[in-house]
Image (cartoon, rainbow, N blue to C red):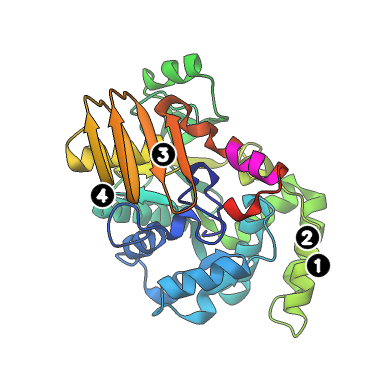
Amino acid sequence: MAGGTGTRLWPLSRKQLPKQFLKIFDDQSLLQKTVANVERLIPKEDIFIMANAERTEMAQKQLPDHPLANFLVEPEARDNGPAIALASAMLNHRSPGCTMAILWSDHLVRKPEKFSSVLQAAFDTVDEHPEYLISIGIKPTRPAIEFGYIRVGHEFNTNTTEPVYTVDQFVEKPDLKTAEQYVSDWKYLWNTGYKVYRAQHMLNLFAKHQPVFYATLQQLAAAIGTANETSSVKLHFGNLERRDIERLITEKEDKILVIPADLGWSDIGAWNTVHEVLAEQNGHHLVIKGNHIGINDENCLVFGSNKLIATVGLKNIIIVETEDAILVAHKDAAQDVKAITDQLKEQGKHLYL
């Protein structure tokens, strides 16, 4: 899935170049890294990229060797529930009975070998138990309030190389006090949003839990592969409820399993996460990219380009400089950067979006 906007990484992430296409950590974008990780296990012809038309063009430029037929165009942004429904219908039409994995192009996975092992275990579990959805969860390393959580149940008997557990509950983003409790309790995992399942099974779950949604989805699916596919998919997709897959399906479904994993995983959702990753990578709490002079600064991220950025006595501060904008934020407020983009929209300052 490569259709996100990445507003919390403003001003670097923009409408013309969202975060999944940025080369933040090295010479590969997050999208390129994700595809490279998946290619360790899955042949290129079985890897599909979904985004809107504009971002599909960006993805094709970054993945020039990828089959053009494997770029699936999402007609408009309607949250990830309709996108997953459309992808499931399209791949089920192309390969009836297929197993598919939903992965996000703006995540960072620093343990690709483990990622391959966990993904293979998820595929094997679906082959053995096709009536289940498989999630992948991460053991929390801090009380994150920006993630959803999965409460783990009992171990599920499978013949896989990775342990598999039942899911007791999907939990929405908690407050800080609740998140602190989750970190100390081994039964709670971060919800990566990764899902592995039979494509037809996902369509059946929409029929079971969202009959109104499914009626429209059926009309959409019937047009796939016909001469009217583009226009019909666009029409019916716009009538699907704008909602995420957790609320549409997973919070309502009982037969869901989870594989806990240490993938060196980060959801690059905000600048504080970028700082954490780069600080670990560089082995120092002060992370500098660009032209900078600093005196007595502590635990800061300075992400600049050509302008000289001079700082004195800063602590827990993020500074991001681009050609036309500068962001200065406290690390603890990094999640609120999205509010800036909301204000820019309200004020009609679209050149900065």
Per the image, is 341 magenta?
A: yes
The span picked out in magenta is 340-345
Percent across and percent down for residue 233 are 74, 70
Which of the two labelled residues, at mark 2 and mark 3, occupies the earlier sequence position? 2
Percent across and percent down for residue 16 are 54, 62
Which of the two labelled residues, at mark 3 and mark 4, occupies the earlier sequence position? 4
Q: Amino acid at mark 2?
A: Gly
C-beta proximity under 8 Å, tags 1 and 4: no
Q: Amino acid at mark 1?
A: Leu
Nearer-the-camera pick, 288 or 93: 288
As drawn, is 90 to the left or to the right of 64? right
Question: According to the image, label 1 marks what residue?
Answer: 235
Percent across and percent down for residue 163 are 33, 40
The structure residue drawn at horizontal position 53% and vertical position 41%, both measured from the top left corner, is: 256
Which of the two labelled residues, at mark 3 and mark 1, occupies the earlier sequence position? 1
Q: Amino acid at mark 3?
A: Trp
Measure how far apart labels 1 and 4 are at the Cα level: 41 Å
Measure how far apart labels 2 and 3 are at the Cα level: 32 Å
Question: According to the image, label 3 marks what residue?
Answer: 271
Vertical arrangement, residue 136 with respect to residue 76, above or below: above
C-beta proximity under 8 Å, tags 1 and 2: yes
Question: According to the image, label 4 marks what residue?
Answer: 111
Percent across and percent down for residue 43 are 37, 73
Dot 1: within a 10 Å radius of its alpha carbon, few (fewer than 14), some, or many (20 or more) residues?
some
Q: Quadrant of residue 330?
A: top left
